[in-house]
Every structure is written in structure tokens, then in C-alpha cells.
Image: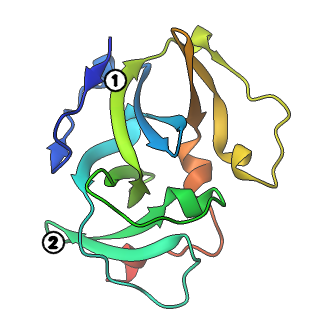
Amino acid sequence: MAEEFDEFDELELEEDDETEEGKYLTFNLDSEAYGLEITYVTEIVGIQKITEVPELPEYVKGIMSLRGQIIPLVDVRLRFGKPGRDYDERTCVIVVEISDITVGLIVDGVAEVVAIPEEEIVPHPDLDETDSRQFVRGIGKVGTAVKLILDCQKLLEDDEMESPSQEA
């Protein structure tokens, strides 16, 4: 049920709504495993040149140009209040599209695409809106492992974060 990614550079994902239902792209931040609904993911690319933009929140690292489109980049580590780290060859940008807004999510590394039936996703206990758990929609059980399933919309909601792609 899992598809492993050997090469992260410019990996394009096929759009097929029927086969995407219940599938999640999993990625890592430190030792924690997260999942994003595959329906939001348009592609995965390696880390590229980032142009800094002044007066944005710390977790918005800047913008990058991807085939002529300007995409704001959110460092998911910083968005979750984790300490930053240097980017390396495993660092990836997961390009997502939500409500006609395209954003790149910088993660430590992409793992695989897994199918997680809705009945295998349980609510996050003790949701506390003051930390990164506010972005977690639920906990997906994959065999003996668990993946924190993110709410992509909440991850990108922020009054401080204006979309630089709108201004370009």
C-alpha cells in the first residue's frame, strides 16, 4: 500500500481523485512522522534558491520561482515552533494548493504515500490551540506506526502570512 520515493527532485504527482481518496503523503520532521492529504499535493521538489522577503513571519522563509510561478515557502519546523536546522540533500519542498493558493512546505524529508482508511484516523487527544497540535486533524494508524495527519488549511491560515504570489 505504500509507494516509496527514491528521487525527490521534481517529482510530479498524478491527479486522479478516485485513487487519491484516503491517501496521504508522509514526511518527517526529526523523528516525528506527519501526513498530508494527497489531494492538496501538486508536486515535490528538492530545496531550491530561496529569495527572502522582509516583514514576513519567521516561518515564511521567502519565495521561490517554480516554472515561472512565484511560490511562498513555509518552513514547517518553524511553523510548529521547533528549532530550525540547515537544509540538506534530504530537505524537500512539498508544493500544495489550497483554495487556489499555492505554497511550498519545507520538510526534513518525504517518506511515502500511504493509504489510511478514515476509520483508522482517531481524533488528537487534548487539542491545545497554543502549540503545533492545533494543526493536527487526527492520528492515523499505519500498522504499528502512527502518523500525525495535518489539517492543511489550518497550517496555512495566519493573519500574518499574506501570499507573496498574489503580489508578484
In the picture, measured across the screen, residue 102 lies left or right of residue 135, that is left
Residue drawn 84% across the image and 45% down it: 128
- Seen at 57% across and 32% down, the residue is 149
Residue 20: in sight, yes or no?
Answer: yes
Count of numbered circles in the view: 2
Amino acid at circle 2: Gly
From the image, tell me which residue sits under label 2.
Answer: 68
Return the residue nearer the eye: 18 or 145. Answer: 145
> Which residue lies most toward the bottom here?
54
The percent coordinates of residue 104 (x first, y second) are 37, 59
Q: Image quadrant of residue 167?
A: bottom left
- The disc label shown at residue 20, or none: 1
How many neighbours does mark 1 have within 10 angstroms: few (below 14), some (14-19), or many (20 or more)? some
Q: Is residue 135 above or below residue 165?
A: above
Tag 2: Cα neighbours inside 10 Å, few (<14), some, or many (≥20)? Answer: few
Front residue (pair 155, 1)? 1
In the rendered view, tell whether residue 127 sits above or below residue 167. Answer: above
Q: Amino acid at mark 1?
A: Glu
- Quadrant of the image containing the N terminus: top left
Judge left or right: residue 161 versus residue 45: right
Residue 136 image point, x, y percent:
65, 39
